[in-house]
Amino acid sequence: MTASKLSTALLLCLCGLGQAQAHTLTLSLDQFRVKGGKLMVELYDNQAAWNEGKGARDYKIAEVEGDSLQLVFDHLDAGHYAVKVFHDENGNGRLDSNFLGVPNEGYGFSNNAGRFGPASFEDAGFDLNADLGLNIHIR
Amino acid sequence: MDRRQFLRGSGAVLGAALWGGVADKVLALGGTEILARQPWAKGFDGVEQDLPLLEMTCSGDWPRSLEGNLYRNGPARFSRQGFHYRHWFDGDGMVQQFRIQQGGIRHQGRFVRTHKFQAEQAAGRFLYNAAGTAVPGALPVRNNDDANVANTALLPRNGELLALWEAGSPYRLDGDSLETLGVKSFGDKFKGLPFSAHPLVDGVGGLWNFGCWYVGGDKDLLLYHIAPDDSVAAMEVINLPQAGYIHAFAQSQTKLLFYVSSCVYEEGDTYVGSFRWRPELGAKLLVIDKADLSRQQWRDLPPGFVFHFGQALESEGELLLQLSLYSDSAILTRGMQALLTGQVREQSPDAEWATIRVGLDGSGKLQGEPAITRSGIHMEFPQFEASATPTRLETVFGIGASDHSASGLSDTLYAMGGNGERKQCYLGPDRILEEPLYLPATPERAAMVLMTWLDYRQGRTGLSLFSAADISRGPIAEASMDRVLPLGFHGCFA
């Protein structure tokens, strides 16, 4: 076996190990202003998709029935991710906002990033190298 | 000598006031260690509970025809779980109601149940950053209203009482019970937007108001015309040359007048802490036509800073604007820094009663450069017989601190006549005065001035009623109670 074939074999082996050790991301979401409506949660793994709001790595939709809830994304590869959340409080399928674009419905980001307004992928980003739990306050 | 004679005699001999010392020392209140040293500081201790009904003790000649409610708003809760705010503006708003009825006066106070207040009551601690204080572990905010404490002013409107803040939505209150009814909505498009605490009536059932939007590098003035039915009749977004602190505005017959100060929003830990004094930018006079909000006229002014305005008037070929003018913004910026560091600092410059005049041609265009006339009188919280279409200069009432004020806080009431005549009344060594409200004449009685005060030595809060025609005679009636109310900002009579 040549050196390059050996390297390729090791790489394949490592990748296989990675898949075998897929990680779980558990999100604890709280501070809902209203009960009812749907919580839209999107998981991104790259900045371009984050900026465009399309091409999320995964997403979940949950009914809001209490003050908080947990959601689990599993079988995730190790990597760099960021989470966007919005609470469609009135069930119209979109994030309502005022004429300056400031949301009138709940939203949030991983790391609770975004001081006033949307967070960047960089600010909301986190490394997933093992099973991870994150708390996101809906604002 | 009885009390009234004393008041009259004292008022006649005092000189210029030093209102700047008032807010300066107020703003320097950082922690309980400072509060403990100052006997007058009990006016800023705040309260933790609503204040139940209490009958006041009345003296003097309260007119039987004077019936109604004096409402006042101000910051009233400053600490939770041992954490104390660093700025007077931060406290949760409490509305004080003085009900004047059938010869008696009863007081009650009730916190405005803002989203912030309710969430923090439930949590037992501060959850959100305040305008001037960063709170440890603060929750992220959705929009302006998460920090809204509705603590600045009150406006009777369409059968309700609106509790106003300078950067968020009004809160609706029941004027009898003071119960909070909810957030005032002007429509979904206008939710959560800044809406100043100093709207102006348009004379036909509507309102003019504005809000400053200094987010993400924007330097926008949002200008609203609210219709009688509370819909937004007109909205204009005006891009400002500088993000100057703007607290209030004024109106003449056909124009809205703004003073864009040299204290500009940059970047900081808090909203108030983000303002910096930039004298090199000067200040700007912005004049808007009421009939067409897109028509702007600008004039450069020397550096300055303003919270409150008196009257504006178009008369004899000139546009005139009265204001309480500070030579710099130390009252806001240095005070804020001192609060954040907990350091005591020197006194900042006082607000001087001044008038800006600029020529006006027959078509409403400004002519030439503005001129500023200074009165030499230091006075703030101006009040007068307001009109959407003023036709003459009215007497303006305000307060200031005399040279003899042990606290540095306001102890003197002023009346600045449109003809240049000045009258004043000193209220005593231990009294701190609040904004004097002008009560227009009715068929039953003459015009009056009604104001609240705190006697910090005796721990009493009271009311003084004056004849507007001659405040130098002293109060014609008073009322007081053994209750220390937090000193506040603005009020109304309804």
Image (cartoon, coloured by chain):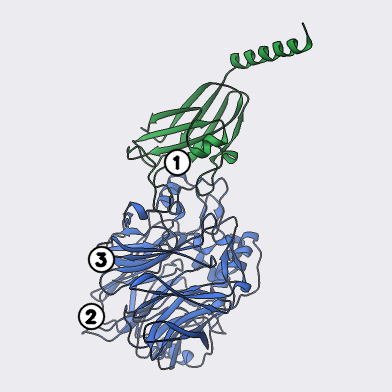
At x 37%, y 87%, the residue is B362
The image quadrant where one finds the C terminus of chain B is: bottom left
- To which chain does the residue with label 1 belong? A
Amino acid on which the number 3 mark rests in the picture: Pro
Residue B65, disc: 2
Counting other residues with Cα less than 10 Å from the Cα at mark 2, is it few (<14), some (14-19), or many (20 or more)?
Answer: some
Q: CA distance from mark 3 to mark 2?
A: 29 Å
In the figure, B461 relative to B136: above or below?
A: below
Counting other residues with Cα less than 10 Å from the Cα at mark 3, is it few (<14), some (14-19), or many (20 or more)?
Answer: some
C-beta proximity under 8 Å, tags 1 and 3? no
Residue B377, position as x, y percentages in the image? 52, 86
SS class, disc 2: loop
SS class, disc 3: loop
The reply, left or right, for residue B466 in relation to residue A7 is left
- Chain the render paints blue: B
Q: CA distance from mark 1 to mark 3?
A: 34 Å
At x 36%, y 55%, the residue is B190
Q: Which residue is mark 1?
A: A107
Q: Which residue is mark 3?
A: B228
